Image (cartoon, grey):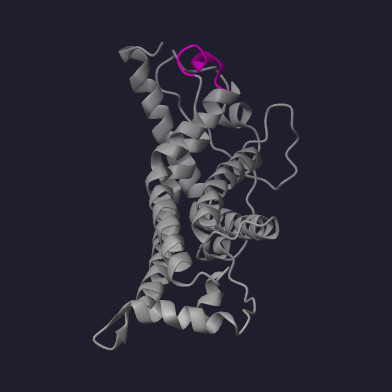
C-alpha cells in the first residue's frame, strides 16, 4: 500500500526517470514507427477479415479498430523490452549510457546506480514519419460488376435534393471523417509520445523489480498508464470509423473497400 510518505519520493523518481527518457530517446520517432507498424498490421488484419467473408464495412472497421488498439499495446510492450531488456538479458541493441539518478529519500534507494537498476537499452535510428492507420480499412481497389451500376444510381436518386445527389456527398463526408480522425488521433498520440512512453517505461521499471525497495509500495502498471492516455483518441477513431462504414455500406452496398466508392460517385 502506497502511503503519503512514499508518494513524494516515488513521484520525484518518476520525474527524473521521465526526463532522462525524453532526453536520451527520440520518443516521437519511436511512436511514429509504432503507429506505422500498427497501420501495416491492421491492414493485414482487415484483408484477412475480408478474405474470410466479412463484407460489412461497419463491422470490419469496428473489429479492425479494436485489433489495432491491441496491436498498439503489443508494440508498446516490445518497445519497453527494447529499452529495458531485463536484468539477465545482455544488451545487444546498442549503447544507452544512463547517468546516476539520485533517488531522493533513502526509502527508495537500493544503493545502486541507475545503470545497474535499469539495465542497458538501445536507440534505434530511423527517419521521422507521420502515422496513420488509414490502411486498416483496406484501401486496395476491387472491380465491381457493371450490373450494380443501375441499382446504385437508383439508390443515389432516392437522396436527390434540389438536383444535387445527397448520397455521394454523404459518402465523401464519411470517408473524410475517417481520414481526419485517424490523422488527428495519430498526430495527437505522436505529440504526446514523450509523456506516454516515459510514463509507461517508469511503470514497467517498477513492475520489473529493478527498484527492489519499491516493490512493496507499487507493482507498476504500464498498460493502465497507456490506456489512460490513449483510450479517448482510439475510442473516437473506432466510433467514427464504424459509423462511417455503416453510411458507406448503406449508400454504396457494392463497395467492399474504400476505393470502391468511386463507382458510387
Q: Magenta span covers which residues?
A: 210-218
Question: As displayed, is residue 241 above or below residue 231?
Answer: below
Picture quarter containing residue 144?
A: bottom right
Question: Magenta span has 7?
Answer: no
Q: Is residue 97 among the parts visible in the rendering?
A: no
Outermost residue on the left side: it is 162
Question: As displayed, is residue 169 above or below residue 124?
Answer: below
The number of callouts visible is 0
Judged left or right of residue 194, residue 53 is right
Judged left or right of residue 115, residue 109 is left
Residue 11, x across and y down, in percent? 37, 27
Provide the major secondary structure of the magenta segment. Answer: loop
Question: Magenta span has 212?
Answer: yes
Judged left or right of residue 224, residue 60 is right
Residue 133, x across and y down, in percent? 53, 60
Question: As displayed, is residue 252 above or below residue 6?
Answer: below
Residue 80, x across and y down, in percent? 59, 39
Q: Give the residue drawn at x 40%, y 23%.
A: 10
Q: Give the residue drawn at x 43%, y 64%.
A: 178
Q: Is residue 237 among the parts visible in the rendering?
A: yes
Amino acid at each position: 500500500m502506497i502511503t503519503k510518505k512514499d508518494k513524494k519520493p516515488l513521484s520525484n523518481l518518476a520525474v527524473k526517470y521521465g526526463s532522462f527518457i525524453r532526453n536520451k530517446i527520440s520518443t516521437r520517432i519511436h511512436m511514429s514507427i509504432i503507429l506505422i507498424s500498427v497501420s501495416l498490421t491492421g491492414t493485414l488484419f482487415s484483408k484477412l477479415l475480408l478474405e474470410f467473408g466479412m463484407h460489412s464495412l461497419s463491422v470490419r472497421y469496428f473489429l479492425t479498430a479494436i485489433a489495432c488498439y491491441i496491436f498498439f499495446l503489443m508494440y508498446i510492450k516490445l518497445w519497453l523490452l527494447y529499452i529495458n531488456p531485463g536484468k539477465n538479458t545482455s544488451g545487444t541493441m546498442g549503447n544507452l549510457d544512463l547517468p546516476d539518478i539520485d533517488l531522493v529519500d533513502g526509502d527508495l534507494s537500493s544503493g545502486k546506480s541507475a545503470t545497474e537498476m535499469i539495465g542497458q537499452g538501445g536507440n534505434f535510428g530511423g527517419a521521422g514519419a507521420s502515422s496513420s492507420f488509414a490502411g486498416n480499412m483496406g484501401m486496395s481497389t476491387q472491380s465491381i460488376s457493371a450490373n450494380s451500376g443501375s441499382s446504385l444510381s437508383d439508390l443515389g436518386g432516392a437522396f436527390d435534393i434540389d438536383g444535387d445527389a445527397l448520397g455521394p456527398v454523404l459518402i465523401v463526408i464519411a470517408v473524410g471523417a475517417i481520414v481526419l480522425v485517424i490523422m488527428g488521433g495519430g498526430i495527437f498520440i505522436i505529440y504526446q509520445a514523450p509523456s506516454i512512453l516515459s510514463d509507461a517505461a517508469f511503470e514497467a521499471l517498477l513492475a520489473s523489480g529493478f527498484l527492489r525497495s519499491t516493490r512493496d509500495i507499487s507493482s507498476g502498471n504500464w498498460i493502465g498508464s497507456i490506456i489512460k492516455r490513449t483510450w479517448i483518441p482510439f475510442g473516437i477513431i473506432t466510433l467514427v470509423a464504424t459509423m462511417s462504414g455503416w453510411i458507406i455500406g448503406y449508400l454504396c452496398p457494392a463497395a467492399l473497400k474504400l476505393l470502391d466508392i468511386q463507382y458510387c460517385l
